Image (tube, coloured by chain):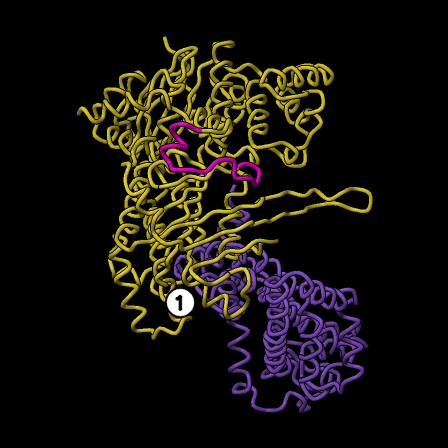
Chain colours: A purple, B yellow
Amino acid sequence: MMLDGFKRFARNRGAAIGLVILLFVILTAILGPLLYPDSPWKMVQRPFLPPFTMDGLPLGTDALGRDVMAGLVHGARISLLVGLVSTVVALLIGVPIGALAGYFGGFIDDALMRFTEFFQTIPSFALAIVLLAIFQPSLFYVILAIAIVSWPPVARLVRGEVLSLRSREYVEAAMLSGQGTLQIITRQILPNALPPIIVLASLMVATAILLESSLSFLGLGDPNVMSWGYMIGTARTVMRTAWWLSFIPGVAILLTVLAMNLIGEGLNDALNPRLSRKSR
Amino acid sequence: MSLLEIENLAIALPAGADRQLAVENISFGLSKGEILCIVGESGSGKSMSANAVMGLLPEGVEPAGGHIRFHGREILHLTEDERIDIRGKSISMIFQEPLSALNPLMRVGAQICEVFEAHGLLTPAERMARAVELLEEVGLPDPDKTIRAYPFQLSGGQRQRVMIAMALALEPEILIADEPTTALDVTTQAQILALIEELRRKHEMAVIFITHDFGVVADIADRVIVMQTGQIVEQGSAEDVLLRPSHPYTKSLIAAIPGMKDKPDTGQTHSQQSPVILSVKNLNKTFSTGGGLFKPARVVHAVNDMTFDLHLGETIGIVGESGSGKSTAGRCIIRLIDPDSGTVRLSDVDLTALNGHALRMARSKAQMIFQDPYSSLNPRARIGRILTEGPIAHGVPRAQALDRARELLSLVGLDPSAVDRFPHEFSGGQRQRIGIARALALDPDVIIADEAVSALDVSIQAQVLDLLADLKARLNLSMLFVTHDLRVAAQICDRIMVMRRGQVVEMGPSAQVLGQPAHDYTRSLLDAIPGRHHEAAMRQSVASY
């Protein structure tokens, strides 16, 4: 079953391209510190060195003479870390809430869903800004803020899935056989709700990377880590004279987010073959 | 010359399917005004040949050879544009599931008018007038009002009538009906069959009727084609095929039809003398839907004051049409649905008074077999896990539970090695056997079978029924058998309870209820069973071979 899914996934050219880009970004994140052991904050040359003008500094330097390539490589780690961890945290909040609401229904469902809507009615970016204004801007709180604004869609999705799965006959059979509620939810229902959750999660990683970049651009990110959003943020004042300083990290964000979206779409087609948009 | 001629048709399945060709060597003709039935079990390719006529083959499935000629003109390889001209106008089709075949967001009238619109015929006003005529012709009550109804406001039978009206709109020469009555109740099925028969006579229309039910065949067919794994194994006039079948497969299909008088008349008095194991008293359940400030809620009395005793070793059949509350009753008894009032005593325990942990423990003595073999097993769990979860939840050690699972698998006629496999590796009949093994895993006293064989092909159905009867005798089980099929009930039940709109209208020993029904409703159910009048003859013919 898994193998079939992988074949279907690999047949989708967009998804394969996305996977290649993502693997490249992951490799960069892992090997980056080996290639650029120095701090990306270190000044190495005169400022505003354009790309491809000096050996050893392929992408030039920024307004303070820091190596743009080093920043990009170190930023890859931060972007991926924030994207993955905040998604995991959002799943940890959203899945239980959605599962409980969907399984029990009635009052519990109402209460949990109103709570979810409370978060959904506030624009997520505004909420993230407010949260970071309250907390200190450290990497931990950036991740937490992103997770807090991105779990509601997970809860709603899981609730819908659980709602339809809980009336399946095998769930009724499990009830009859004396299994407890927790066991039924975790062993019978959730494994079958997994495919759409995986797809959503892959798209959430992309959104989280964008959110982190936007927050850093506004100067609300962790000031001690070099991230792509921070690089664009500091370069915005020199946009007209040194456009490449915002352009290069921008392309990095674009490619990574695009890769995640392509993968998400590929996963969707592979895991839900019947819903595949290509049939017909 | 016949109207439609199919010659050596072969249709290729995509690579990786269980066989290379969906159908091969299909040759038959169809003449004006003739009803041709194509019979076969699921997977026999019976729908595929009809779809090829309409050019409606699924993606990846291609015709591999042969000819389909309509009025002598080859139509197998037409382009989509050329096909549109034939579809609807010359050949039209009705489908199994009338709910999914109609657009839920469009009024019925508009959907019929669309047929004319697609072929650029008539003015809008004329189209509407014609739609009303058509609805009247297919016997829908109050056509002027029905035309403004949405599909969800109609019953299954009414929807199928609308589908037929659409198919008839352009007065086609051929109507292809793909299992049009399978999703309907027996009484509705009888009406639809009568309608098709009548329309055929009036319009001299040829009908290709695809079905798996030999009873239906006996009722309407002029000629019959029997298919098995993509091949025609027998064809001939209805009388020849049904009464003098020559191919062993046809014989086995006819022999597998559950008959009304199959049950040997034994054990009834015996089982009624044994102690009561399940006692249901004044069970009630109502559902209310809708309703608002100014509109009273619609209240449905799904189970109305049900009272009966089930004795040890006895099987009671609960029969009725869809919506009669028979499934709700079964689920209330076992507390999958909470009843509004009444008591259910299983041995000495009142199930309705229990909750939480105590209910979970007590319920192990009453287990259920479900209808749909595809949704009743968790697709992501191995068979071993499916069969052991229950016992483990009741404190049986894992190793012991697994041993028991292997035993149960051989008890239901499967290989014990199945514990390591996933549900999708099994066929529908095998899955139903696994479902039965799961119900037995907790050593229950009472088994509630909810339409347990309704989703299976006749030959598989017969095997599963035999298995149930055998297990029941060996393990001294008591059973509540919920079904819509009186023939199945006749085969396995000691007593039969007939339900209608939540009420038990009649209850008594099987032979009495089916032989001398006391209630009109039971009589109308019995009359509607397809092929009833040919049954004795068919049975004899098979027996005499």
- The three-letter amino acid code for the residue at tag 1 is Glu
Image-based side of A279 in relation to A232, left or right: left
- Pointer 1: what residue? B389
Q: Could you tell me residue B65's position as x and y percent?
A: 33, 28
Q: Looking at the picture, how far across and down is residue B334, in whole percent?
A: 49, 56
| Residue B275 vs residue B152, the one in the foreground | B275
Q: Nearer the viewer, residue A182 or B186?
A: B186
Q: Nearer the viewer, residue B542 or B518?
A: B518
* Callout 1 crowding tier (Cα within 10 Å): few <14, some 14–19, many ≥20: many
Work out whether A1 lies above or below B53.
Answer: below
The percent position of residue B227, horizontal first and vertical second, equals 31, 29
Q: Is residue B256 left or right of residue B163?
A: left
Number of numbered discs on residues: 1
Would you identify the image quadrant in which residue A198 lies?
Answer: bottom right
Q: Chain of mark 1?
A: B
Location of residue B424 with respect to A232 vertically, above or below: above
Name the side, left or right, on which B382 lies relative to B520.
left
Q: Which residues are magenta?
A: B500-517
Which quadrant of the structure image shows residue A262? bottom right
Front-most of residues B237 and B318: B318
Point out the image quarter for the N terminus of chain B.
top left
Q: Is residue B508 magenta?
A: yes
Q: Vertical placement of B467 versus A26: above or below?
A: above
Residue sitting at x 71%, y 15%? B123
> Magenta segment: does it hold B345?
no
The structure residue drawn at horizontal position 59% and vertical position 27%, both measured from the top left corner, is B158
Q: Secondary structure at mark 1?
A: helix
Give the residue furthest to the left: B545
**In x, y percent, where is residue B366?**
42, 58
- Would residue B126 be seen by someone viewing this image from the given angle? yes
